[in-house]
Amino acid sequence: MLVVMKATEFVNPGQVPVIVADCPLYTQQKKCQWKFPDEVGESKMVCFMGFLHIEMMSQECGGKLLAGSGWDRMFALAKIFNTGVAASLLSGKHVKRTRYAYQLTLAWLHVLKIQAYEGYCQEGYGPHESMEMWENRLRNNAPTTSYWLTVRDYLRINCRLIRGQRVRNWPLTLNALEDLCPWLFAFGHTNYAHWMPVFLKDMANLPDTHPAVHEAFMEGKFVVQRGDKKFSLMPLDQSQEHSIKFLKEDSGPKGLYAQQEEKEINELSKPEVLRAIDEFEVACFSASSEKESLEHPESSAAEQKKFLNHLKELCNLAKEDKIVSPFKEMGTELITLDTGEVIDHEISNSLREAPNIGKAMFIEFVRDRIEKATKPLSDVIPRANLLTFTNRPPVDLKKGASKLGSAKANTALVTKLFMSLQARPDLNIDDFFKHENQHEPPSLSDQGKLRSGTKSDILRCLPGMPGPGPSPSAKEASVVVLDMAAVIHIIKTQRARVFGEYTQMDLMPYLHSLMTDRTTRVDEVWDKYIEASLKSQTRVKRGGTAGYRTQVSAKIPLPKGAQWQKFLKDSQNKDELFQYISDELQKTTAGSKYHLLTTKANLVLSNKPTDLEALSPCQQEEADTRMMLHLRHTAEQGHTKAYLRTVDSDVVVLAINLFHELGLSEQSTTSQNCWDLKNAKHCPSSTRSQDVTLYQQCMELAKKLHGMRGQLTQKSPTPSL
């Protein structure tokens, strides 16, 4: 710093030195100013934070805000950038490319907002809300729109920062930096969050401490124009990067590091030599060549045309439903652009409150550490722990904590009781350990949840088990009743790319493989997923909290492989998928020769006109008992042979036990193995009597358990106990 002061005094006597640096060097400069006020204090020189590095940091913040939302993949789908380049936009490594992506995003959001508002005005009769009121209503009620409005506000701050530099507007630049500060606190950029307020405070005091420097900044001398192009001014630290690039041309000082004198001569003389060469080339070739345009390169017709084409590609993605349109998604959930994944409300609320959280932390920092100085500037800034698409709350964290707390409590309790036992030698230690020390005995429950066994073991008692695959009698059935929840788990997503193709490409071929020439009716029964259900605990045990929400619509990409299994672990995903497929099956099979009945929530859909009063509406939650209703309905319609396809042992037990009540002459069920229920109902005499008795007791118990969930009738509005 002393060397800079001497050099400035030598070149321009009386000028106040201004040192430009990135955040780490700026930090050291300020510490030196405070430690040595007489030599390099704030009254002697001005420390300036480089705007190029601030922009790079702001693009990193933008990457954290946008990561996981599908924003980067949107550019890949529009073929503006390839997948790797699009992913690099989130890190802000390429400043110019990321800046271009931000400009496209702002224009894209503006066009979609205008289109959505025009569509709103065309709906019904007026009076309609103003655009501002309409936007505020969406911000408060539609999480997806609210998120992208937040993104828009952040990108506008970045664009104002760039514009302030390009047009030499010092107040606009400082205003953009002040608006950027809360985001530094929200996203945990602690270095810049510590020192950006200090820099802004110094710049606010500049008219009093260094009026000449402030006047120069107001004239636009806080940026550099290295060429004659319009709107091409750049920050001081970016100009320094260009000078370093010139030094590295033609090998630069390579090989001179051991020769300090030659290295210094090269570094001092080469920029001037390059400048002289450029001026000579301009003077020599200006007469023979056409006059060079002074317009900014991005204002050329070719660049403007490219920008418009890219903007049209992005708008077409939303128009063709390849991505979600932010201003048309009026649901109560936040969803991603590309995959339609539904984000937790906790994350949605965190992103909505991010500006307010950062602003509160910024105001508190300025008040306590700069204005009142009640806390040291070096104190650690607590992280906001902002939840985003990529920073999600941990899963099943409470389970481990509760187990650890329970173990500690048990240890302390047993220790106290055992010590009290030692004080009473007449007591029997065996009697002491006979009593439980918990409300829920560990032998019967796990953290208050009843332990369960393997339900499929009940089928081991069934005599005469055939081999895998449908039995010969199943091929003679005229009715096929399918447990569709099991079918969806069986079929892998292979050919289909989006949900709209899944029914036709993957599901229908499998369904046709189960039919024969005798098949005249197909009943497809789906489960319902009620939030306040007796089975909610079981779903959690099976990994119901390990899935992720995804919106189901025709253009949303279909999860593949392991992602498909995770998708099916979420009950809301399955509920939306089942209802969507039911509608698709009804449309797809409209002209088929067989009669299709498919359930949709409480209703039953049919591809042919038929009387569904006995089946719809139905309050049965599970497909287990609802399949029995459909079997009885087939018998009433004159069918005598039915084939059930399931992987649930409950269906096997219910079908055997209710065989005579259903009114069928023959019934076959395929679970993990194939069962001929007509023969299974009458066990051979060679079967051990204790096995038969045990099996009958299991069937009666299963029937009673299903009776608790709902009687075998569609008319019961609530489960009958």
Image: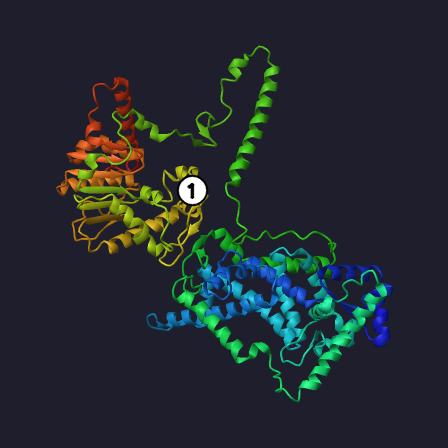
Residue sitting at x 30%, y 42% = 621
Q: How many marks?
A: 1
Q: Quadrant of residue 688?
A: top left
Residue 544 sits above or below residue 258 on the image? above
Residue 346 sits above or below residue 437 on the image? below
Front-most of residues 57 and 311:
311
Q: Position of residue 594 (x, y in %)?
A: 18, 49
Secondary structure, mark 1, is loop
Q: Which residue is mark 1?
A: 544
Front-most of residues 233 and 46:
233
Q: Position of residue 338 (x, y in %)?
A: 44, 58
Q: Position of residue 142 (x, y in %)?
A: 44, 60
- The answer to whether one can see residue 359 in this image is no
Toward the top, the furthest residue is 426
Residue type at tag 1 = Gly
Q: Quadrant of residue 373?
A: bottom right
- The answer to whether one can see residue 339 in this image is yes
Front-most of residues 648 and 342:
648
Report whether 423 appears left or right of 131. Answer: right
**Image quarter (top left, top right, bottom left or bottom right) of the C terminus:** top left
Toward the left, the furthest residue is 638
Q: Position of residue 133 (x, y in %)?
A: 45, 69
Give neighbour class at mark 1: few <14, some 14-19, many 20+ (Cα, 10 Å): some
* Colour scheme employed for the rendering of this structure: rainbow
Report whether 556 appears left or right of 401. Answer: left
Q: Quadrant of residue 541?
A: top left
Front-most of residues 303 and 187:
303
**Image quarter (top left, top right, bottom left or bottom right) of the N terminus:** bottom right
Report whether 630 appears left or right of 567. Answer: left
Report whether 692 appears left or right of 151. Answer: left
